[in-house]
Amino acid sequence: MDNYGFLSILPPVIAIVLALRTKQVYVALLFGIWFAWIILEDWNFFTGTLAAVEGLVNVFKSPGNTRTIMFSALVGALLLFIQYSKGVEGFINVLNRIILRFEKKRSGFSRVVVQLMALLTGILLFVETSISSLTVGTLYRPVFDKLKIPREKLAYIADSSSAPSSILIPFNAWGAFIMGLLLSQGIEDPLGTMLSSMGYNFYPMLAILFVFLVIVFKKDIGPMAKAEKRTRQTGKLMNDNAQPMLSSTVTAFESKEGIAAKAYNMIVPLATMVLMMPVFLAYTGWDAVPASISFGDHVFQAIGNGSGSSSVLYSVLTSIIVAMLLYRSQGIMRTKEMVNLVLKGISELMPLALLMLLAFAIGDASNELGTGEFVANWSKEWLSPAFLPATIFVISSFIAFSTGTSWGTFAIMMAISVPMAEIHAVPLPFVVAATLGGGIFGDHCSPISDTSIISSMASGSDHIDHVNTQMPYAIIGGLVTVALYVILGLIII
């Protein structure tokens, strides 16, 4: 791979700036992809344009990318199913009874309780970030709407409780991926190293803590404060010019007439999707376990070696099949209705699938340019050991922000930060934590992050509004994290 130097960071940065300035995410990403391939093709506009088209096609060469895009489209079918069956209405009725109970005790307290329930749900679904964000957004969007809580707040809760909990409770595909990266760097005890780093992984802790404090003390800042004021004064859940990631067809699909509203018609399919995730992780990783001392140990190792993208796809397919059987047994839907709903749901989420395609394509182009390697190598020579964790965090943040992927950042940075820790005699857990936390922080701030996109989609929020309202909290958490790493570096290293 050629060394493109400073040019390597221009395409993703330009795409991000254009997206934030114009709110035309699709156009911004397409321009970033095109510009990246123009650079890669030595400024030949004709071959660069053709290469950009091929770059979009090549996204599907990755099975993981293809599965994620398919998952994103199939989610639409599941959302229409649970609304058409009156499952959402039944769940809302259950939550309404809980809300009334708290409202009788203390006026206005129901808003706090529901938001805390959403936060807790996101944390408990640490098994996979996509399922966490999707479930929180889907379950709580109708109740948030009724209580006049802005869509941006739900997207913030869904996004800031998913990846942070998955990285802090790493008994999932995230943990397996991180352990694999540590093993590739010659770490003899990857599990112990990863668990030791959790105590120094400050940003995910702060992200969850900030959500809790914002909910309990009702203290919003920046664009989120404006969103709360807008909803409180006008009742508008989104800005006038907002373009929600879910169409009104998906968010307000009419339920079937003449049937009873039952909460389990929503809970059973969603619970199936969540519970099948570890099952499919174990299944896809079963043969990859080299040796085990017991069946339980084999299952645990298999989950750690499982395919996250395969598991989320299989889980949502299983959920759809279970929903079909459940609704057919109750006489709610006939086979023809089910097929039509599946096709309609997929078609309604095509914009999300397209956005995923573009996000993956610009990530691939950034890899071709060597964006991550350039940023990481740029700082190698002038680092002081005391400032290494803080610097690693900042560099990881920038790579994740520019590429929109925390996992890609982990893969790039772990190969650089681990050897640097050894060279500078810095405790390895510090550097591993800084690498992981920086990836999460940059991912939280990036408008091309897949987890942020799914959070916006599930919450029915305008994606750029979600990024803008979440960013102040993320930046504060990032600055506090940097300060903590500097202090610890000066004291301990």
Image: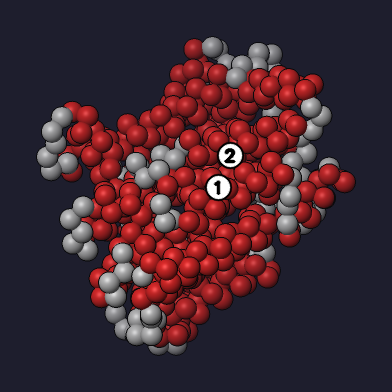
In the rendered image, which quarter contains the N terminus? bottom left
Q: Residue at x 50, y 50 (%)?
A: 205
User: Is 464 above or below relative to 324?
Assistant: below
Residue nearest the viewer, comparing 425 with 295: 425
Mark 1 crowdedness (10 Å alpha carbons): few <14, some 14-19, many ≥20: many
The amino acid sitting under disc 2 is Leu
Q: Quadrant of residue 85?
A: top right
User: Residue 188 location, x and y as percent?
Assistant: 17, 55
In the rendered image, which quarter contains the C terminus? bottom left
Can the viewer see residue 401 in this picture? no
**Relative to 38, 246 lies left or right:** right
**Relative to 420, 153 lies left or right:** right
The amino acid sitting under disc 1 is Ile
The secondary structure type at the circle numbered 2 is helix
The secondary structure type at the circle numbered 1 is helix
Residue placed farthest to the right in the image? Answer: 233
Q: Quadrant of residue 158?
A: top right
Residue nearest the viewer, comparing 21 with 184: 184
Label of residue 119 in the image: 2
Q: Residue at x 29, y 48 (%)?
A: 176
Q: Residue at x 69, y 13 (%)?
A: 258
User: Residue 409 location, x and y as percent?
Assistant: 39, 64
Q: Residue at x 48, y 56 (%)?
A: 202
User: Residue 411 location, x and y as percent?
Assistant: 33, 63
User: Residue 302 location, x and y as percent?
Assistant: 24, 38
User: Is 12 above or below relative to 145?
Assistant: below
Please state which of the two labelled residues, at mark 2 or mark 1, is closer to the viewer: 1
**Relative to 477, 177 lies left or right:** left
Label 2–label 1 contact, CB within 8 A: yes
Can the viewer see residue 277 in this picture? yes
Upstream in sequence: badge 2 or badge 1? 2
